Image: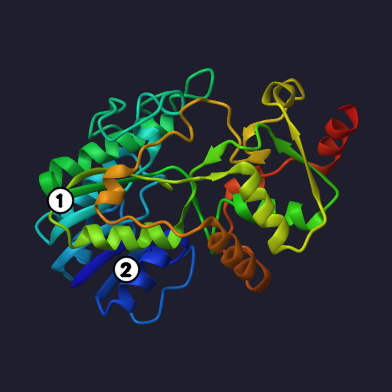
Amino acid sequence: MRILVMGGTWFLGKAVVESALSRGWVVTTFNRGRSGRDVAGVEVVHGDRTLREDLLKLAQHGPWDAVIDTSSSELSPREVGLAAGSLQDRAGRWVHISTVSVYEGWPHQPLTEKSPLLDCPADADASFGYTGEDGSPTQYGFQKAGGERAVAEAFDDSAVFLRPGVILGPGEYVGRLPWWLERAKRGGRILAPAPAEQLIQPVDVRDVARFALDQAVSSSGGGFNVTHPEGISFSGFLNECLAMTKSDGTPVWVDGNVLAEQGVKQWTELPLWRTHAGVWAVDSHRASEAGLRCRPIVETVRDTWKWWAEDGRPVNHPRWAEQGIAPEKEARILASL
């Protein structure tokens, strides 16, 4: 099996490469060579995927049985389409890492793969779309929906779209789980979003990588929601963080309305917390039937803590600075309860 990984040097892209090599596959990676080290054992092609001449040079290294695209999050649909169109005669399938943000109803409504998508043309530039007053829909969601359409136009039934919600695990560049681990380690009274029994659906990066590779050899196409089918309660998640860091911290569960009144930003100041009804109601039965297997969250927490203690921050990424409430603000809120 010969595959091309767009990206391939950090977090999901790196996990895809490592998993593919463990299967004995032949792997080519294509990236700019700026964000991380290339994994040993791959054929490395450096270039800019937004430049046609670089893509034409890349195409000469093919053909491949499949392309797995892990690096389109900041690209316009037009740019995604440029890559897909340039490689459509050099690859049998295209596995595209997308997002649940492509759905019209996210995060307000429960979702399945049959839920309607945001409407964005395949040739849209980076200015297309908007972000709603309440934070949904997002311009990012429109852009990703347009990217899916661009890939579908090039690869038709051989296009696969993986739509994760939140991906956690070793090498995480956003910093959600590392922040909770550090906060647990610090101990004391910990501000936590009620209800404690709220189920969340983060999925481990290694499980997403394995599923992406499985889809590279599958004959099915279309969209798959990639979320933890069972989920874990927020209290269970936080308890695992406390246990892993050997902390004596005590969660103080505070109603979401109170947190909002105190000006706590959802999704970032308390990572993974959001009050919208559909944010953690994403059905992933189709992916499960196609072979998605999600490990227990304790393994994700354990391995992320090990990586964090040994290696630390993977790449310099602007989203890292958004995660976590300032200690002074947290202390002020806790004192006011």
Q: In this view, does 247 lie above or below 332?
A: below
Q: Give the image location of residue 305, x and y in percent.
A: 64, 65
- Of the numbered discs 2 and 1, the one sitting upstream in the chain is 2
Q: Name the residue under label 2.
A: 29
Kindly identify the residue that appears in the image at 48 percent across and 35 percent down. Answer: 280
Mark 1: give few (<14), some (14-19) or many (20+) Cα within 10 Å.
few
Which is nearer the eye, 254 or 159?
Answer: 254
Which is nearer the eye, 52 or 75?
Answer: 75
Can the viewer see residue 55 in this picture? no
Q: In this view, does 261 lie to the left or right of 156?
A: right
Q: Give the image location of residue 98, x and y in percent.
A: 34, 44
* Helix, strand or loop under label 2: strand
Q: Mark 1 points at which residue?
A: 220
**Closer mark to the observer between disc 2 and disc 1:** 1
Q: Quadrant of the N terminus?
A: bottom left
Kindly identify the residue that appears in the image at 75 percent across and 51 percent down. Answer: 183
* Helix, strand or loop under label 1: loop
Which is nearer the eye, 109 or 179?
Answer: 109
